[in-house]
Image (cartoon, rainbow, N blue to C red):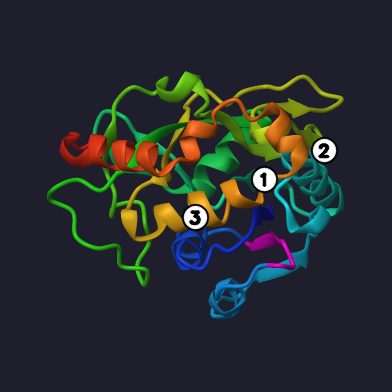
């Protein structure tokens, strides 16, 4: 069984080695990279095997989430994998035993989902933060256990953080915008044990300000601006408030 990770990036130099180490268990990772990327993302990707870059240009280099999903779905269509893990650069999903909080082996869980006739694994993501006891992120190590403190409310931020991130190719033929839905000729059959995930949107000030302000907000397309109702998410004051909010959160896993 071939498993492929699929993700669309722009200027992800900081998160790139963390992401690629987290998903190193997969057979292949495909990065849809905006060609105007101007940091060290390509150099970071080059350090890893079984990772390929596909140029995925945006109009005028601007972020257009509708076009992003068209590009992801095109890559989805020509993938030769049996299962795909479709995630953003700041989303680290994993199976976990919720009783012991021990992480489980992802490939085994996907194989079990396949054996039992399922075609979707839902991933419910915790918003994680740097807390008072955390040290600086070590980008030479996998990320999951480096940021384990966060918001225990899995419905935080309008409940956006439950996604069908792991899907069976063939049964599922497309992903919805933001990876919040699936399409296909076969009804989604959801694998019973949900996965969890660490959403690194606010995981460390070392990269959050640049990533959210310079690399996201200042390159929004007109179409994104027209439907972006949460522009405060990109303001310096909001980012500081979120980073401070997580300083004393309890450990989640």
Where disc 1 sits, the SS reads loop
**Residue 252 visible to the viewer:** no
Q: Is residue 91 left or right of residue 250?
A: right
**Residue 173 visible to the viewer:** yes
Indicate yes or no whether the magenta region holds residue 230.
no
- Tell me residue 229's x, y (percent): 60, 25
Q: Earlier in the sequence, mark 3 or mark 1?
A: 3
- Tell me residue 89's x, y (percent): 54, 53
Where disc 3 sits, the SS reads helix
Residue beneath disc 1: 220
Q: Is residue 198 left or right of residue 91?
A: left
Picture quadrant of residue 35: bottom right
In the displayed structure, 54 sits above or below 1; it is below
Q: Of 85 and 42, which appears nearest the observer?
A: 42
Q: Residue furthest toward the left? A: 133
Q: Which mark is residue 211?
A: 3
Quick one: quadrant of the C terminus? top left
Residue beneath disc 2: 170
In the displayed structure, 118 sits above or below 92; it is above
Q: Earlier in the sequence, mark 2 or mark 3?
A: 2
Highlighted range, magenta: 27-36
- Tell me residue 104's x, y (percent): 39, 44
Where disc 2 sits, the SS reads loop
Identified at 47% across, 35% down, the residue is 233
């Amino acid at each position: 069984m071939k498993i492929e990770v699929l993700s669309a990036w722009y200027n992800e130099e900081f998160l790139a080695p963390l992401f690629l180490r987290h998903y190193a268990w997969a057979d292949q990772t495909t990065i849809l990279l905006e060609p105007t990327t101007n940091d060290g993302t390509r150099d970071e990707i080059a350090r890893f095997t079984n990772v390929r870059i596909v140029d995925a240009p945006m109009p005028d280099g601007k972020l257009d989430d509708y076009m992003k999903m068209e590009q992801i779905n095109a890559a989805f269509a020509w993938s030769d994998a049996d299962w795909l893990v479709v995630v953003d650069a700041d989303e680290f999903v994993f199976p976990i035993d919720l009783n012991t909080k021990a992480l489980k082996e992802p490939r085994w869980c996907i194989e079990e989902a396949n054996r039992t006739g399922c075609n979707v694994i839902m991933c419910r993501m915790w918003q994680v933060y740097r807390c008072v006891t955390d040290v600086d992120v070590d980008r030479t190590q996998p990320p999951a256990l480096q940021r384990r403190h966060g918001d225990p409310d899995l419905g935080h931020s309008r409940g956006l953080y439950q996604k069908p991130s792991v899907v069976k190719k063939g049964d599922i033929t497309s992903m919805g915008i933001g990876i919040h839905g699936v399409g296909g000729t076969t009804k989604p059959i959801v694998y019973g044990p949900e996965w969890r995930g660490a959403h690194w949107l606010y995981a460390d000030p070392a990269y959050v300000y640049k990533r959210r302000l310079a690399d996201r907000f200042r390159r929004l397309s007109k179409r994104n601006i027209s439907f972006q109702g949460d522009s405060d998410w990109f303001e310096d004051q909001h980012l500081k408030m979120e980073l401070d909010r997580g300083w004393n959160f309890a450990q989640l896993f």
